[in-house]
Amino acid sequence: MNIRLDPITAALGAEVSGVDMANVDQATLDELRKAWLDHKVLVLRDQHITIDEHIAFGRLFGDLEIHPFVVDVPGHPEIVKLRSTANEQAAAAFWHSDVTWREEPSMGSILRGVVIPAAGGDTCFADAGAAYDRLSPEWKERIDPLVAVHDFTRAFGSNLSDEERAARQAEYPPARHPVVRTHPETGKRSIYTNRVFVSHIEGLPADESWETIQYLERQIMNPSIQCRVRWDVDTFVMWDNRAVQHFATNDYWPEERQVERVTIIGDRPF
């Protein structure tokens, strides 16, 4: 295949053309892997493929996780379905990377547009490595040795009974990850905290821990290190959870938005 990459911004992201996701040979896969590392967010449009082909494409990059808390598509447990309607709003409208509460969080996510509102519903991405690079030397020295505790109960615990919560906490105990993680392939250092999954930073008083988490999020929110993706039906976006954070805008109510995701298992952050 003859792949073309058109950068979305100078900082982050690229639109990819010349790829059929249902028929990827080894040479094309190698190009996609390199482009993913280089641009961190890839957008592939007009990919009219089946759910099974979506799953198969994800498996080209690694094993796929089964999410324990989010509804899947019947018969396809690898697919996470995220649906927001006029009656039930469900947008991930906060900066985060996926499933950081796992001991081995996601390497990457591949999301498909299924039902897209006429306006709104974009996803914003931020380069967490660039956010780290822009910190002062004093802030880098301060946070480099720190460890954050990530806990699923902050996002998913309220929908569980006490017995269910205790059972899931035994299965998925809080995970300790460095506040600044190192990308295992590029060696790039990046901010690895978020307000939705991180309960606290070890060794800091509660107020200082929360202030640090908020300060680091504000660095992620800098528009100069971001790109923004407008969705269409059968647009696919794949992003590197080791390098970027994302935010799904909730600006389309009362229209419906539905997307489907496969999530590639990663390794323990260091």
Image: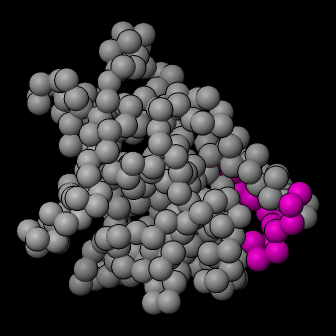
Task: Name the image quarter holding residue 24.
Answer: bottom right
User: Who's the residue at 43% across and 33% down the image?
Assistant: 191
186 left or right of 88 in image: right
Residue at the far bottom: name it: 74
Residue at the location (82% across, 53% down)?
Answer: 30
Q: Residue at x 22, y 29 (%)?
A: 202
Query: Looking at the picture, does residue 202 appear above or below residue 95?
Result: above
Outermost left residue: 162
Q: Per the image, is 169 magenta?
A: no
Where does residue 253 sit, x and y in percent of width and height? 31, 75
**Is 241 situated above or below 188?**
below
Direction from residue 188 to residue 39 in the image, left or right: right
Residue 262 appears at what percent x and percent y?
54, 69
- State the image coordinates of residue 38 (x, y, percent, origin top left): 70, 41
Quadrant of residue 169 within the rendered picture:
bottom left
Give the vertical position of 34 relative to 113 (above or below). above
* Percent x, y of residue 74: 45, 90
Any part of residue 258 in sight: no
Q: Is residue 25 magenta?
A: yes
**Which residue occupies the foreground of this view, 70 or 8?**
70
**Coloring applied to the structure:** one colour
Quarter of the picture containing the N terminus is bottom right
Task: Give me the residue at 33% from left, 51% from top.
Answer: 101
Q: Magenta span covers which residues?
A: 13-27
- Residue placed farthest to the top in the image? 138
- Whether residue 230 sits left or right of residue 148 in the image: it is right
